[in-house]
Amino acid sequence: MSQSYRINSFDEYKEAYQKSIDNPEQFWGEIAENFTWRKKWDKVLEWNFTEPKVEWFKGGKLNITENCIDRHLETMGEKPAFIWEPNHPEERVRVVTYNRLHKRVCQFAQVLKNNGVKKGDRVCIYMGMVPELTYAVLGCARIGAIHSVIFGGFSAQSIADRLDDAQAEFIVTCDGAFRGDKVIPLKSVIDDALIGNKTIKKVIVYTRTRTPVSMIKGRDVWWEDEMEFAEHQVEKDGVVSFPAEEMDAEDPLFILYTSGSTGKPKGVVHSSAGYMLWTNYTFNNVFQYKQGQVHFCTADIGWITGHSYIVYGPLSAGATSLMFEGIPTYPDAGRFWDIVQKHKVNILYTAPTAIRSLMGFGLAPLQGKDLSSLQVLGTVGEPINEEAWHWYNENVGKKNCPIVDTWWQTETGACMISNMAGVTPAKPSWATLPMPGVQPILVDDKGYEVTEKDENGMLKGNLCIKAPWPAILRTTYGDHERCRTNYFATYPGLYFTGDGAIKDENGFYRITGRVDDVLNVSGHRIGTAEVENAINMHAGVVESAVVGYPHDVKGQGIYAFVIDNNTHSDDELTRKDILQTVTRIIGPIAKPDKIQFVKGLPKTRSGKIMRRILRKIAEGELENLGDITTLLDPNVVEDIKNGAL
Ligand code: PRX
């Protein structure tokens, strides 16, 4: 391993950071030497943020699965790659060694090939958290197909939109998924999503819950049958092989849909080499992973956190990644602690919303649980409030474990601003310092760098990044212009994150939340426009406006102001109908927490909704609404205030 690869002290961090800025090509070129390449790159980096165009390791050839699996086989073949903890605690734990993972991924790559999947084809994966999901993801990567994993909580309509946008031809799914005491009928949701679909050729169905499913002749096939057949093809005389497709460094690896402030979710595209390097580098350095440790990231693989810190980051580092099928409160609120004890988890990486929700159960679920294996804790997905930070530190980490507060996004691929466990300083509720290669800048609304400190000595502004890091998104699928306007046009020459941040005298950053019309509900990104569109689909709704408000557990709650056509007689029933509509159109995660029926919305003369006013009302701040004289009809504000929930 090259020296700059592993950061062991604050001084080493400072040195690495400086080097990464002074000479990024040399810095990342050295780090890239730590991977398996079929052919070395011609040029480390070429970029401009105008088009935008970013190319890392151009001309290099590799396959990410050879880096995540094959290269570990000789020395670590019998070491666990995954430990799988099922939803039901009594069910058998599954341990997938690197050898076994290799076999299953080769088999599934063969299944894909047998079913006509080729390099560059889009494969949608809609499964619960079972090991087979990782075989599907890695099987795609092995043959160079582009995977698009969709979180199991999205509705048929959301899936249909994503299938259409990606022009996907293949789906891998399960009959159903266990989540706590519920069974989610995944295949049936897929069947609904496929009504009217013209691109899907094959659906591969893995049996998990034995939920009855309809299997359409010629289109739907069983995972188990396909895998059995493929086994004979990939295994000869006890030797398993399925040659990995040679990929260009810049070939797309996957699409992951995420919400923005306008329109439908966009397909963020990540490339092979840069993403691999960045997830691996941040995994090793942020968590300070040491061989043999058990890493437990509680996210779902349907989100970027699961992609980067359950699958690609840990596997590329030869780590043991714990994958959990269930939820933190099933069968009771001590489940995470049971898992930590049972599997001697060393690193626990979760979301502030999970911590806050577990805090609500008090300390009883922690009692008698042996958490002494824990060495590092992490949080991701939303700002962590100090109270939750201290609770985590005292009751889970027993004040013995550094906590890393990792700020990043679907678009950034992996951690961008975070302390490194025990190596760089932590500060409660601050993400602290940028990773090597990350150059944050705070700008005002006109795009000028903020240089004046506020009364607390802080710089405050919109968070942008000045130059590319290896896993910056390359495009939004099928619509590069959308990528440009969303991320690179607000402040020309900069990547705009959509977040606000403050910076202290030590150069530490604290992320304060989104400054655009994107909500962060329980660590999940939801666009207000998306929720409004869904509400507006409901018969009787004339118009709606959605804003976020502070929520004790979820971080933000969804507050909807709805104008209806005044024909309904029962508010409560209509609310339920609207919730049902949102569930149908997007999924249960986007259901508003509060729905207030109003007669009008505060609009300017040009017809723009003044969300600032609605946000204040949703926050319970009914006085000091600011200047409302520019409104077309200032009287609506009084009305809305009177009906505030
Ligand atoms: O607002 C920031 C918040 O989550 C957004 C990204 O959401 P998503 O793409 O779904 O990825 C979540 C997992 C990486 C960011 O724009 N966010 C993420 N991590 C933090 C955070 N806010 C504050 N502190 C964090 N550590």
Image (tube, helix red, strand yellow):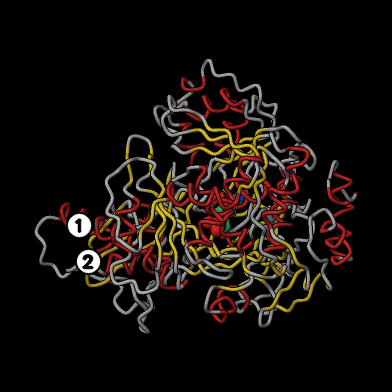
Name the residue tied to disc 1: 577
Residue 49 percent location from the top left of the image: 70, 78
Whether residue 382 is visible to the viewer of this picture, yes or no, is no
- Observer-nearest residue: 535 or 334? 334
- Observer-nearest residue: 196 or 142? 142
Q: Amino acid at mark 2?
A: His
Residue 355 percent location from the top left of the image: 51, 36
Image height check: is 58 above or below 72? below
In the picture as drawn, the residue positioned furthest to the top comes out as 368
Residue 408 percent location from the top left of the image: 63, 56
Asked if the residue at tag 2 contacts the one at tag 1, i.e. Cβ–Cβ closer than 8 Å, the answer is yes
- Observer-nearest residue: 631 or 418? 418
In the picture as drawn, the residue positioned furthest to the front comes out as 237
Give the CA separation, mark 1 to mark 2.
8 Å
- Observer-nearest residue: 259 or 126? 126
Q: Left or right? Give the position of 9 relative to 165.
A: right
Mark toward the start of the polypeptide (1 vs 2): 2
Image height check: is 215 above or below 369? below
Q: Amino acid at mark 1?
A: Asp
Q: Residue at x 82, y 69 (%)?
A: 41
Q: Residues within 10 Å of mark 1 (few under 14, many from 20)?
A: some
Q: Left or right? Give the position of 529 relative to 580.
A: right
The mark found on residue 538 in the picture is: 2
Q: Residues within 10 Å of mark 2 (few under 14, many from 20)?
A: some
Total numbered labels placed on residues in the image? 2
Image height check: is 526 above or below 368? below
Under circle 1, the secondary element is: helix
Image height check: is 583 above or below 635? above
Q: Quadrant of ligand 1?
A: bottom right
Q: Residue at x 38, y 69 (%)?
A: 161
Beta carbon of the mark 1 residue lies under 8 A of ligand 1: no
